[in-house]
Amino acid sequence: MADPYFQQLFADRIGGADYGKGTEIYKFEKIKRAKRQALADHPERALLDFGIGENDSMAPANVRQVMADEINKPENRGYADNGVIEFKQAVARFMHREFGVELDAATEVNHAIGSKPAYAMLPAAFINPGDVTLMTVPGYPVAGTHTRYYGGIVHKLPLLAENNFFPDLDGISPDILAKAKLLVINYPNSPTGKTATTEFYEKVVEFAKQHQIVVVQDAAHSMLSFDHPPTSFLSVPGAKEVGVEVHSMSKGFDMIGWRLGWVCGHPLIVQAFADVKDNSDSGQFIAIQKAAAAALDDASIPQQTREKYRRRMTKLVEVLKRCGFECSMPGGTYFLYTPAPKGLADGTTFENGEAASQYLIREQSICTVPWDDAGPYLRFSVTYVAADEAAEDALMAETEARLKSLAPVF
C-alpha cells in the first residue's frame, strides 16, 4: 500500500517520514502482549500480576460521596481553567499539615489533570533548542520526552546501588552544567523505592543555586514512605527559591483514574506552568477538584493507603528473599526494585532484565516490569488485586511456589 501524502509531514520529534514504520515495541506493550499470550496458553493458571503499578482500590466512599453531590450542582458545570480556589486551599492545608510547608494558595499552587501533564508542560516553560534537562534513570520519562520535543537534550543521571540510589550531581561535566536548565528528581523514587534524606535535598538546593538550575521534584509517591514519615522537598530551606514539587491524587489517595495533581512552589514557576497550561487544557472537572479537596482534608486516607502497601510489601520481600532474590524493604513507593536473576538452575540464562521478565510471564504467568537503564533489574508492584489479607497470603504462597520451582540463579 502506498504511503499517504502526509507520510512526509510527520514531525521529526515522533519519527518524521518514518513514523509508523518502525518495528520496535514499547516495553509495556511487550508486557501486555506477553500477558495476553500467557492467558491464552494457560487458561488454567492464574496470572500473578506484579506489573500494574496503579492502585487496586477505589477512592474512599466519603470522597465518592462528595463527587456524587458535586456532580449535580450547576455551578460546577463550566470550565475550571487554572483551577478552583477550594482545591488550592485544600492543597495548602495538606502541605502544612503533612510537611510543615507554608504555601500561598492563590499564587504558589496550581492544579494539573494528573501529574503526568505537569511533567509534559514544565519543559515548555524553560527549554529552548540545545538546553539540557538533567533526569534520573530509571525513572518516569515524560519530562525528558517533552524536553526533546522542544529541541532540548536529556542528560541521564543513573541511580546506582553504590550511590545509594541518589544521582551523582558532582560528576556532571561543566559542559553539561553550562547548558542545564532543569533537574528532575523523584523521591520516594520510582522504581528504586529510595526515599530522600534532608541532606540530599539540601545538596540539591545548593547545586541548583550554584548552577542556576530549576528543580522539579516528582512527589507522586510522597505519602507512601515506609522508613520515615513522608517528607517534602519544599520543607528544606531555600527549596522554594529554586523550584517546584509535583504531587498526585493517585498513589496516596486511590484516585488513579480521576486525573488530578498539582504543582506547588516558587510563584513565578507556578505562574509559568499556569500560562502553558492555559494553552493546553481548560482544567479538570470542578466536581473532581472539590472531591479531591475533601480527600486532602482527610488525613486518614493516605495513612490507610500507606499501611496497606507497607503490609503487602513486607510480605513480598519475605517471599522473594526465600526464593533467592537479593532484596530488602524499600524506603517507599509500592514498587520493589530488585536485581534480575541471571538464569535458572536448569541452565537457562538471561541476558538482561527484559529477558528474565519475559520468561517469568511466559513460563509461570508472573508479570513484572524490567528495568535495564542502570543494570538488569525487575520491578514488582504490590498493587495486585486482592480483596483481603487472606487473598494476599494466597497470592504470595502461589508466587513462592512458582518461583521456587524455577530455582533462579543470581
Image (tube, rainbow, N blue to C red):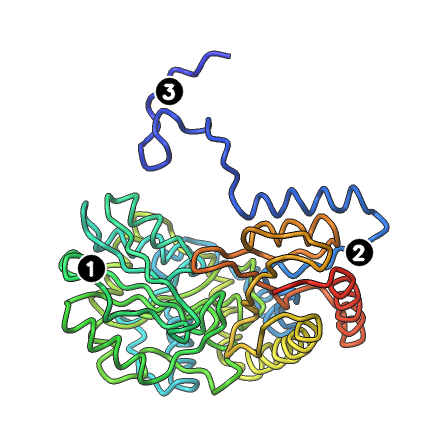
- Whichever of labels 3 and 2 marks the residue nearer the N terminus, that label is 3
Q: Which residue is at a point 69% across and 47% down the rendered structure image?
A: 35
Amino acid carrying label 3: it is Phe
- Whichever of labels 2 and 1 marks the residue nearer the N terminus, that label is 2
Q: Which residue is at a point 69% across and 51% down the rendered structure image?
A: 361
Q: Which element is circle 2 on?
A: loop
Which residue in the structure is indicated by mark 2? 46
Q: Within 10 Å of the Cα at label 2, are there few (<14), some (14-19), or many (20+) other Cα atoms? A: some
Q: Which residue is at a point 37% across and 71% down the rendered structure image?
A: 88
Which residue in the structure is indicated by mark 3? 6
Q: Which element is circle 3 on?
A: helix
Q: In terms of image quadrants, where is residue 367?
A: bottom right
- Whichever of labels 1 and 3 marks the residue nearer the N terminus, that label is 3
Q: Within 10 Å of the Cα at label 3, are there few (<14), some (14-19), or many (20+) other Cα atoms? A: few
Residue ranking furthest to the top? 2
Q: In terms of image quadrants, where is residue 314?
A: bottom right
Question: In the rendered image of this protein, does residue 32 appear above or below residue 380?
Answer: above
* Residue 117 percent coordinates (x, y): 39, 54
Which residue in the structure is indicated by mark 1? 181
* Residue 238 percent coordinates (x, y): 22, 81
**Nearer to the camera, 223 or 193:** 193
Q: Which element is circle 1 on?
A: strand
